[in-house]
Image (spheres, rainbow, N blue to C red):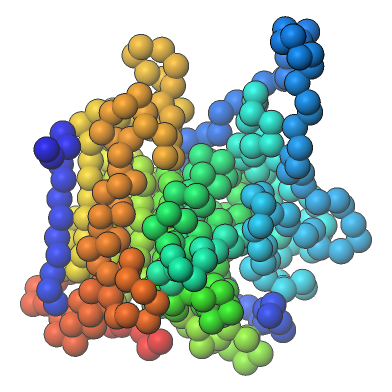
Amino acid sequence: MPLPLIATRRAIVSAAAVTALHWAFSGPPPSAQTPAAQAPAQTAAAAPRPPQSVLGATPAPQHVPAPGPATDQPYAPQAILAGGIVVPLFPPGSPMLKADRIKEPEVYNMTGGVPGRIASIVNIHNPSIELHRVPGSLNTGAAMIVVAGGGHNTLNVGSEGSDFVPFFYNYGINTIILRNRLRRDGYEPLTDAVNDMLQAIKVVRAYAQDWDIDPKKIGAIGFSAGAELVSQAAVKYPEYDKTQDVPGNALAKLSSRPDFAGLIYPGPTPFRGGAAAVIPEDAPPSFLAGGGVGDASHAVWADEYFAAFLRARIPNLEMHIYGNGRHPGDPLPEGGSMSGGLTDRNDIPLGTWQFRLIDWFRDLGFLQKPGVETKAARDVATRVATPPQGGGQRGRGATGPAPRH
């Protein structure tokens, strides 16, 4: 039985470390994003209750994650889940980093009442990725970079980050958690954070062979403010690659193009209010989901992106706007607030969006074994070779030439 939707629209057109890098950046205008889904407020821990069990006091929790120490070297980001492999995005001394703050440790906000669970992170000055691999027997070669939201004021790496590692594991998808820089810490989302997003794709491609990742199956899924970054990455990769193609950059010839893009209850996209944005001819397939009137601003932003990509006839575009749903953190009529990420949201259909994502991912061939050409790749190649007539409108999703990879 189909899910109740305000709109479900689908358009499918046939058709080891980084060293000695030199950077040249010129960024887009400041973000219009208003603070969106914030992490749940962290309250002071209540005094422990006297033990009630006949067995006495509960043992203390083990292996509670904590930030690394402050040293005289750049801060070393720590894994937030057991077994994570953490790789900084930029080398020490890069002009992308703030030398006066690079040594500051990150700050973890823990989930109240759940020992060991990180709800969010702030004070990020050495952006990084954290890899969680799947075994060869399950591995599809796909790599999903997960980009948490938090209104650019915090990074909600619990519900919109680490929770996805076991979920994607079951489908043979390698999960990579991005720790990008935040507005609250003095960074500009549409330059610094978008650069972190695009650089993450380059770094994953650089390690693809070592990590058993198919270099043509690397993409990202973002939530709220994180989806804003993914939407920018979906059109800005030609510009970023051009600025990075300089002597001495070990990643100069590696593409930052995402092979797919997921936007979940997204913040403002490059097409906000009909804004001009050039869509590359080989722009990635995109999946969008969120609530409808109950989360109207984010639904409008999703629809603007969808409409621009649809006009440009970008293949394999899919969107689900659910009739019942609000933004994470928004109050509910019955009391409490809307949850986000993978939660079932009081057993409403919006809580099943992740299974629609997997259907779409399978449909495009990303769940096949590594090295098998995907439907997504074939359709992009067809579109580039034979651009559709009338695709794209200047100032509202115009298309531009595909870059060389």
Asked if residue 269 is positioned above or below residue 252 in the image, the reply reads above
- Which residue reaches farthest left? 389
Quarter occupied by residue 204: bottom right
Which residue is at a point 31% across and 54% down the rendered structure image? 358
Asked if residue 373 is positioned above or below residue 348 in the image, the reply reads below
Q: 97 and 4: which one is in front?
A: 4
Horizontal and vertical percent position of residue 109: 68, 35
- Which residue reaches farthest bottom? 247
- Which residue reaches farthest right? 72
Q: From this viewpoint, is residue 62 visible?
A: yes
Asked if residue 128 is positioned above or below residue 382 in the image, the reply reads above
Looking at the image, residue 277 sits to the left or right of residue 67; the answer is left
Q: 30 and 296: which one is in front?
A: 296
Looking at the image, residue 373 sits to the left or right of residue 339; the answer is left
Horizontal and vertical percent position of residue 68: 81, 51
Which residue is at a point 87% across and 64% down the rendered structure image? 73
Q: 213 and 60: which one is in front?
A: 60
